[in-house]
Amino acid sequence: MAIERTFSIIKPDATRRNLTGAINAKIEGAGLRIVGQKRVKWAKADAEAFYAVHKERPFFNDLVAFMISGPVVVQVLEGENAVARYREVMGATNPANAAAGTIRKEFAESIEANSVHGSDSPENAKIEIAQVFKPDEIVG
Ligand code: UDP
């Protein structure tokens, strides 16, 4: 299996509660390497562009407001099967349905404030990484 990269966000509910380190411990404990990381405050346009795929969904405006309510930590994670591996570590979108030991089960507050984002396919991972990181900000 080739080494793959995925894009991750530690969301404002988690940065607010000082959970960046605890989430990074889960990521590294799962065998994923953090090869790019920066803490940023997104503008409304950044969140709207990132979640453009959800533009028509009823939760879009609330989601954008949530994602700009505090700092986020954007990350590039590298490892074998990184996209699927990180989805496993994150757990289900709704923390009520997330498996024991997952980030969302342990830390998420709600289906919206669910602590982390992870790309859902290798194709989207490439797009999302390129949206947020310059090549020299990733050190493998
Ligand atoms: N979301 C929400 N309400 C919903 C479904 C999703 O606020 O009913 C938010 C939630 O923060 C989620 C994000 O929108 O992580 C993107 O939704 P998606 O279905 O892509 O879930 P994910 O891939 O993050 O598990």
Image (tube, rainbow, N blue to C red):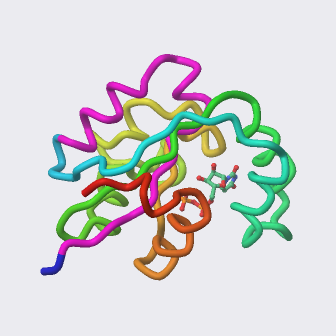
Residue 2 location in percent, x, y?
A: 17, 79
Q: Is residue 75 above or below residue 40?
A: below
**View quadrant of ligand 1:** bottom right
- Note whether residue 105 is visible: yes
Q: Quadrant of the C terminus?
A: bottom left
Front residue of 113 and 71:
71
Q: Which residues are magenta?
A: 3-28
Q: Is residue 14 magenta?
A: yes
Locate residue 3: give its quadrant.
Answer: bottom left
Question: What residue is drawn where x is 25% and y is 33%?
Answer: 25
In depth, the one of 100 and 130 nearer the eye is 130
Q: How many marks?
A: 0
Residue 84 among those drawn in magenta: no
Residue at point 52%, 53% (across, down): 93
Task: Name the image quarter holding residue 51.
Answer: bottom right
Whether residue 115 is visible here, answered yes or no, is no
